[in-house]
Image (cartoon, rainbow, N blue to C red):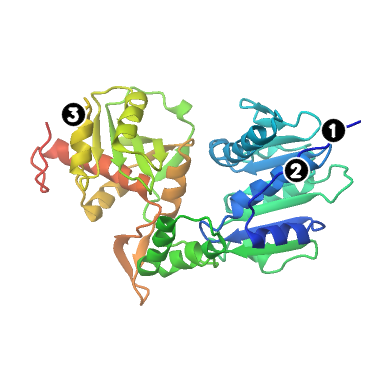
Amino acid sequence: MQMEQPKMEINLIGSFWDFFTLNFDKRKLVIYGGAGSGKSVSTAQWLVKLFLEKEDKVFLVVRNTLPALKITCFMLISQLLSDVTQNTGLQFTINHSDLTIKHPSNKNVIFFKSIDDEEKIKSFEANYIWIEEATEITFEKYMQLNLRLRRNSDTFNQMFLTFNPISIHHWLYKKIVSQPAEDMAIHHSTWEDNPFLPREYINQLATLAGEDENYFSIYTRGDWGQVGNLIYSNYTIEENTRWKFEPKNTFWGLDFGYNAETGLIKVMEYDEQFYVQEKLYQTKLTNTDLIKKLDIILDNRKDIIYADCAEPSRIEEIRESGFYCFPAEKSVKDGIDYVKRHKLHIDIESVNLIEEIQNYSYRKDRDGNILEEPIKYHDHLCDALRYALYTNYIRNVSHRPSSGVVFY
């Protein structure tokens, strides 16, 4: 006799619970909305519930790149199943190399795959497919995934698409949301749908009203917009295995945070171009925590770290711990102008930096005029990048920069 499978006690937001349960017979579930609305977590919870309760099912979870997939969907679902193990004792086989998760008794398996190369999923057959950050992929890749949703099943096969509604010109709006098919259901959400959202995050979303109407529309109201006025276009995204050189100089940029993310980037200079890697992006770090992480992350403690000059006491504490940490030159306009004049090579594994830089935009006033000020939202690594590049330049041209910072 087969043992009864454990049920998952999930804390799904009410609107998501109703959506998933009422649309069990739809082939495609489109789940979009503003930042912090709970759409990705709720989708992951629902898939874990299906994983526990169904039998002999194949789940496919995809994002455009593998590094992004690892630190989002794979980490999230692994943690949810870890909670199940703690509560029930049920042990799952989680393979961190192959990115697969197997159920010990019901024959269910979850595959995590990137879709940057369509060949990776050709000939694949699945019962459930989740496309996280669906705005990252092309319509052709979406169609290829739709063809993979064909495994024989005693239930309806389903695809889940989760994303922020960045542009009305995107195929997701033109071909999906604006003309939904009969086999599709659509869920829209905002931060107001998520009762578990921290107050400081809500406050951050609220400030977007004074920053940029388009950002406010997309990330706070969850409406369709268009990210425009992009600041940087002078970069390529590359595999770091292509970087075959001995850098002329190596230095770091650090943006402090606590409720917001602390961001740390590494910059290597070669042939008047900059090679950039995200090395830290984490909330709730005290300075003691940060110093411990710097001790692990930095290849050479003698490398210079250029840090947010608004936190002099934190800089001093890091310096007293033996690191060469100094205040950054914080002229935003001049710093951006300097960064824009140089070719940037960004490591493809720098997932959060890539997301930031692809959306880093100038503000507009109420009349639609473009201002020479960046929108202050989701920009911690872009700030760290500017601190590093521009301050390193100032340091090299003068040891007495206009800010009064003295370098030792």
User: What residue would you read off at disc 3?
Assistant: 320
Residue 3 is labelled as 1
User: Is 195 on the left or on the right of 111, as rendered?
Assistant: left
Residue 276 lies in quadrant: top left
- Where residue 135 appears, as percent x and y from the top left, is 58, 54
Numbered disc in front, either 3 or 2: 2
Q: Are marks 1 and 2 in contact (CB under 8 Å)?
A: no
The mark that comes first in sequence, 1 or 3, is 1
Residue furthest toward the right?
Answer: 1
- Where residue 77 appears, as percent x and y from the top left, is 63, 39
Q: Are marks 1 and 3 in contact (CB under 8 Å)?
A: no
The mark that comes first in sequence, 3 or 2, is 2
SS at mark 1?
loop
The amino acid sitting under disc 1 is Met
87 vs 156, nearest the viewer: 87
Whether residue 300 is situated above or below residue 362 in the rendered picture = above
- Which quadrant holds the N terminus? top right
The amino acid sitting under disc 3 is Glu
Looking at the image, which residue is at 33% across and 28% down? 292
Categorize mark 3 by other alpha carbons within 10 Å: few (<14), some (14-19), many (20+).
few
SS at mark 3?
helix
* Distance from Cα at disc 1 to Cα at disc 2: 12 Å
User: What residue would you read off at disc 2?
Assistant: 7
Categorize mark 2 by other alpha carbons within 10 Å: few (<14), some (14-19), many (20+).
few
* Distance from Cα at disc 3 to Cα at disc 2: 52 Å
340 vs 31, nearest the viewer: 31
Looking at the image, which residue is at 35% across and 58% down? 376
131 vs 4, nearest the viewer: 4
Looking at the image, which residue is at 11% across and 31% down? 408
